[in-house]
Amino acid sequence: MENQDTPQIITHIEHNLNHSLFDCKWIPCSAKFVVIGSLPKGSGTIEIFEITSGEIKKVKDIERPNSFKCATFGASNDVERRLATGDFKGTLEIWDLEKSCQVYITKEHTDIINSIDGMGGSTVSCGAPEIVTGSRDGTVKVWDPRQRGKPVANMQPVKGETKRDCWAVSFGNSYNDTERIVVAGYDNGDLKMFDLRTMSLRWECNLKNGVCSTEFDRKDIPMNKLVATTLEGKFHVFDVRTQNPSKGFAQVLDSSTKSGTVWVARHVPQNRDLFVSCAGNGQVSLWKYEYPEQRCRIDSQGVACGVPGKLRRLQRMVVSTQPINAWEWNRDHLGLAVATSYDQNVRVLITTKLNLQ
Amino acid sequence: MERAFEIQKQVRDNAKTFQTYITDLQNWEAEMKRKEAALNGDFAQDLPPVRSKVKSEKPVQVKKPEKKIASSNYSAWEKFDVEKACEDIDMAEIGPVSLDSKKSQKEKQEKLREEAQYEKERGNAFVKQEKWDEAIKCYNRAIELVKDDAIYYANRGLCYLKKDSLHQAETDCTEALKLDPTYVKALQRRATARERLGSLRAASNDLNEVLKLEPNNIAAKKQLEAIKARMGTKGSKSKSSPTSESKLFKDILKPKVQPKIIELPDKPMKSQELSALEKWQSGLGEGITVMRPVKKPPHLRSKRALKSIPIQEIPLGKSSPEKLPTRMKIVEIEDNLGQGDTNNNDSNKLKNKSEETNSDIKVKGEGDTKLTSPESLKLITDSVVTEKEMCVHNLVPPVNSVQFMSVWKNLKGQGGVRSKYLSIIEPSKIPLIFENALESDVLSEILQILYEDKEKFREKSITAYLKGLCRVKRFSALAMFLSTNDKKLLNNLLEHCKTVEKCKEEEILDLKNKFEL
């Protein structure tokens, strides 16, 4: 039997849309969220929904000729709330949703932008507002909305090397105005960590399976933990506090999910040791990372080396028949989340008792 | 079966948490919608420079600082314009930033004002429901957001007034009046607060102010009249005895109270013949002044620091021996006669003794002559110790630690009596007597006594005493506190046990263990 304090994952609202959905994001400081996707005829949509007492209501939609793949509010402050999107053709756009128009548009990528992340919008003294995009053309580009047309940083393979499809990017370690790190995951299982301050590759490893999503537990602190999910039902949790020159970071691998792909993992904004992983069979699992007694030890060479913790599954729940491809927790309300899945449904989910964990 | 119940309970609990979550969520939705409506417009932020531009900008920044003048370069210092340099520094600090943010500042203010207004409205709603605490919270928030609006202070003042926090109410109204001296409501509220605080003059001043602003304000007029009446009748008295009920209340009550007073003479007997209790309370015929409890509101109490009365500790029996001996002696004899062998416990006796000693001290002031009797005159010259030795005859073995401790303390400084006292205690009863109340300092005193007067314990043997002490509860903890001196004594005692009392080797070892030697 379950413990008294076991969180429950409940589908609060389920809403069917008749097209493919790729990403969903809460609009900061509101009870609204955007869902982006592509219509059957190949055009892209941005739809804004509002939740009101158990129902969702469409507030607005925007249609564009190209399908959107990913979106973020991360680089925008809470007043302007500008959505940055990446589309199938490699265009990066920043939207003013009030006026339904772009305020920034650039097409530097030559292929689909698979992943996007933003940082620096709402936080104070945690660096410039920046957007990072990862594309099938093998490049990872960092953008500043104040600089038009050109990226502020570009990470691409050296000439002659095969270009790998970049599936996942995310920011982290941005605890002051200068430090910032980008993590990029590739289809061949490469995971690369770029330091934007020194403009160098800080660390890389291969996870054997294509990396579908990456996320730091917090973006605006000295980097603490990193989750990377992969194909074949696995995900890795790295303790990125302590980097050993030879061994890299300590990690925990979970391969208990037997369901194709773990599409996405997202940390609870109110508790960084909790995160959900969304699996290919529509199953959502809530995990808790339990730290070891000591997070680092001195190895035989006298160098600090991280100690991995443990993963505990608090709850799991099948909420969809198809893979869940995007999940986002609400920043302002504990336990509230929105998710899209390939069964063309958008769901508002509730997780209770997270405060007890 | 039980499992089924548990599962059912779990399901119900989960449903409940879910329900509360949903309600929370709905409140949150409403809150978010309101917040969202409050935010629109531009947002100014200090942002770090764009990454790729940093490099090109940096060298420029580095060049900026001017050449420092060397401290030895006097001619350069003479030309140095201090005021201009100061100005430059000031400008650098406020100049560009303040210019830049001026626009947004106004909007920010506007937003804050809106938010504060909202809080005020919520507060007003709470006031209507008479939920004063919640209302105060709302006004607090409003004041936090906008500090220069008299209304928020005045409204909070009203809530405090309703809660009878008169001082807070007064300060709030004062605050409001600082911001808006013509705020009639604040004046009236302050007047009420002050009236109830008893500062009638200040209250009437406030009301006069109100009437200046609004000559036709009937409520203020009435209140002022009432205050004047109070000032007239009670005069200065009213200041010291503020009434806690409001003025309105009083007006209604007054006519009702009077007839009751008339009715009272129906029972005249009682008022004339004081009951025994009343007599006792007033201290009639006892020749004493009764200290009545003073009931004053905190603000009227004396502000002077409390007088500290030195408290002298007079240990039982040890108190100023020159004065006591005669009476002490008499008491002792009386005790013996009165109680005989009834085996009364010692502490009772001691109490009597202490009472006697106390009364003795009082009597003492009137002169020693009173006490002189041929027998006692002799005794006065006796030393304390010998007098105390006499007490030994009355020593009774204690039943519990309290008795032991009181006698033990009593005999402080008289090793001989103490050893005697100890010797009458049955060693096997030591654990029973002390239970867990043996203290380390007492233990070391006991050891000292044992060491000093080995002869007295020959009968019962020191070994037995040591064994008895070991069996006291929590002795192991006490053993840890033994000082080196104690340990020396113990070693000596054990040696004595071994040689004189012919104690067995094992027993010595066991004792050594227990005393952690």
Image: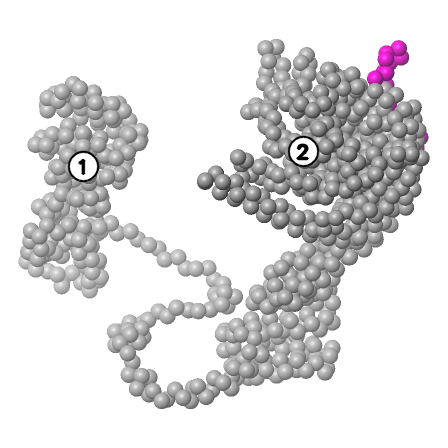
Which SS type dominates the magenta stretch? loop
Along the horizontal axis of the image, is B23 left or right of B95? left
Measured as percent of width and height from the top left, residue A29 is found at 76, 45
Give the chain letter at badge 2: A
Pick the front one: A195 or B122: B122
> Residue visible at 62% across and 80% down?
B223
Q: Amino acid at mark 2?
A: Val
Q: Quadrant of the N terminus of chain B?
A: top left
Q: Vertically, is A82 above or below B119?
A: above
Q: Nearer the viewer, mark 2 or mark 1?
A: 2
Residue A75 percent coordinates (x, y): 81, 36
Coordinates of residue B462 in the picture (x, y in percent): 14, 29
Q: Would you say residue B150 sits in the magenta stretch?
A: no
Subunit that carries the residue with mark 1: B
State the image quarter where residue A166 is shown.
Answer: top right
Residue at 44% x, 69% y is B295
Colouring chosen for the image of the structure: one colour
* Circle 2 Cα neighbour tier, 10 Å, few/some/many (<14 / 14–19 / ≥20): some
Residue beneath disc 1: B430
Residue B157 visible at all: no
Question: Image point 10% across, 50% down: which residue?
Answer: B343
Q: Which residues are magenta?
A: A147-164
Disc 2: which residue = A318
Q: Position of residue B13 (x, y in %)?
A: 56, 45
Q: Secondary structure at mark 1?
A: helix
- Residue B496 picture quarter: top left
Q: Is residue B445 left or right of residue B55?
A: left
